[in-house]
Amino acid sequence: MVSIERRTFLGVAGASILGASSGCLGRAAVVPLRETDLDGVGMLPRNVSEDATVVTTHVVGHRGPDDVLAGEAIGLVVANQAASAAEVSISIERRDLLSWTSLYDGRHSLAANARIDFVLRDPATYRVRVSTPNHEGETEIAKSEFDCNEKAFSLVATDEGIDHSSISTTMGCGP
């Protein structure tokens, strides 16, 4: 009889500790941005040259690529299609409950016809800002975009400004 009470106590105590700390442990375990050469952007929007040199690829988020319940990861391309090299500032923020959380804030010297790829793995609303010394552009990627379709968004620096584009497969995602 004593062992049953002890098991019940330990079970309740363990569940309570796990429940109370799950939010903290979940947040601490998240690595929001990592650099990798294993993942990349599968499709390219029309405003990105297919022969553009990929400088680096960043993976934003922590879920596995096979997490089918979260939908497909979304590709994001920031490219320089201007005639010459450009200083490009990139900011990526994720919409949390009441505010925006900065996930990436970097400045890069991109050669002409060069690009930086991002893979957004976690379904969320993202705000992406790209600026050069002469131009600024911003786009938002809605959480609803994370579905069964492969998608890519782009912000491309040109001599005329920052061009936005996207591409997607159009499969029916089921019920």
Image: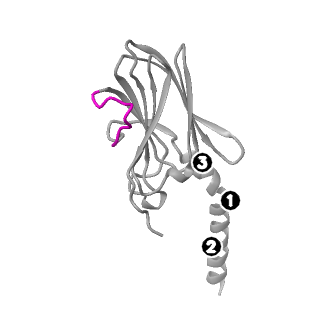
Q: Amino acid at mark 3?
A: Arg
Q: Are marks 3 and 1 in contact (CB under 8 Å)?
A: no
Taking the spot 42% from the left edge, 57% from the top edge, the residue there is: 148
Residue numbers of the magenta segment: 42-51
Horizontal arrangement in the rendering, residue 117 relative to residue 20 (left or right): left
Q: Quick check: 80 above or below 140?
A: above
Which residue position holds label 3? 27
Which residue position holds label 1? 20
Q: Earlier in the sequence, mark 3 or mark 1?
A: 1
- Where disc 1 sits, the SS reads helix
Which residue position holds label 2? 11
The image shows residue 1 at horizontal and vertical percentages of 65, 87
Q: Earlier in the sequence, mark 2 or mark 1?
A: 2
The image shows residue 134 at horizontal and vertical percentages of 54, 14
| Gap between marks 3 and 1 measured at Cα | 13 Å
Between tags 3 and 1, which lies in front?
A: 3
Q: Quick check: 32 above or below 157?
A: below
Q: Nearer the viewer, residue 33 or 91?
A: 91
Assess whether residue 76 is covered by the magenta stretch: no
Assess whether residue 46 is covered by the magenta stretch: yes
Q: Quick check: 24 above or below 93?
A: below
Q: Earlier in the sequence, mark 3 or mark 2?
A: 2
Q: Report the residue that reaches farthest toward the right.
A: 98
The image shows residue 78 at horizontal and vertical percentages of 44, 29
Between tags 2 and 1, which lies in front?
A: 1
Q: Amino acid at mark 1?
A: Ala
Q: Nearer the viewer, residue 100 or 135?
A: 135
Q: Amino acid at mark 2?
A: Gly
Within 10 Å of the Cα at label 2, are there few (<14), some (14-19), or many (20+) other Cα atoms?
few
